[in-house]
Amino acid sequence: MPQPTQEVRNRFNDIIGEPPRWIIQGGIAAILIVWLMLIVFCVNMPVPEAASSVIYIIPDPNRAVITSTIDSAIIKHRNVNNRDHVDKQQQLFTIEGKSTKVLSSPKEGYISFQNYNNPGQWLSKGDTIATIIQLQSILYGYTSINTEQGKAISKGDQVNISVYGYSPSEYGYLPGTVKEILDKDGRTCEIQITIPGKLVTTFHKTIPLSPIIIGKSSFVFKGKSIFQHLNQ
């Protein structure tokens, strides 16, 4: 293919001409302004932060505790299994010491075995055998975090709760919602969290009821900006 001569190239340049200097300067200025805006936005934008803390969930504050009423007693019969639903006045255990005693449920609910519950086990007076828990529509969990992080948390924020003994990779998380935030002593915040009473996880699995459920609460909130971190 024949190459254009110098004369042709000169005519082409004459036709196109050089772009006005104001266009070049304006384009550079616009690019600089956009970059400056991005830098200012990124520096001042809050960085998402996470906080985790131990949470205690109390399914039933008015739970009933079944204890041995006889010293040096032995469990002779057990009429229920762990986590069974029981009725009020239903017979639960028969114990013997110097006398025979039938222990009945003082309320309707679900039974949770404690330290002593098997036939043949010896009991001292006051030993806890089981706890009766009523199923609630809403449960309450309590946790504490430092005040600085607590200031970034608001009522209605969502919380993921992993229960000890139930791996999140297998069971998922219990969904919770922040109900109350109380600055306790200037250093820590007490947080009350509501949890659906059915205790169904994000993996659609049910966590069994027990007198106290212990787990880890995880919060995600807007933290400090990069500028605030740099000026600490």
Image (cartoon, rainbow, N blue to C red):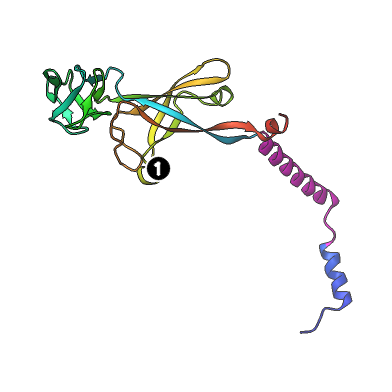
Q: Nearer the viewer, residue 6 or 120?
A: 120
Image quarter (top left, top right, bottom left or bottom right) of the N terminus? bottom right
Looking at the image, which residue sits at the far top?
A: 185
Residue 11 picture location, percent across and down: 86, 70
- 22 is higher (above) or lower (below) than 136: below
Alpha-carbon neighbours of circle 1 within 10 Å: few (<14), some, or many (≥20)?
some
Residue 168 picture location, percent across and down: 40, 42
Quarter of the image where one finds residue 79: top left
Query: Which residue is at a point 15% across and 31% down the rendered structure image?
Result: 80
Query: Which residue is at a point 69% across and 36% down the rendered structure image?
Result: 43
- 2 is higher (above) or lower (below) than 125: below
Residue 134 in view, yes or no: no
Residue 10 picture location, percent across and down: 88, 70
Q: Nearer the viewer, residue 133 or 116?
A: 116
Q: Is residue 19 magenta?
A: yes
Q: Amino acid at mark 1?
A: Pro
Quarter of the image where one finds residue 186: top right
Residue 189 picture location, percent across and down: 52, 20
Residue 178 in view, yes or no: yes
Prevalent SS, magenta region: helix
Q: Nearer the viewer, residue 12 or 165?
A: 165
Query: Which residue is at a point 67% across and 33% down the rendered structure image?
Result: 44
Q: Is residue 72 magenta?
A: no
Query: Which residue is at a point 81% across and 63% down the rendered structure image?
Result: 16
Region of the chain picked out in magenta, as a range: 17-44
User: Disc 1 marks which residue?
Assistant: 168
Image quarter (top left, top right, bottom left or bottom right) of the C terminus? top right
- Decide if residue 158 is on the left or right side of residue 226: left
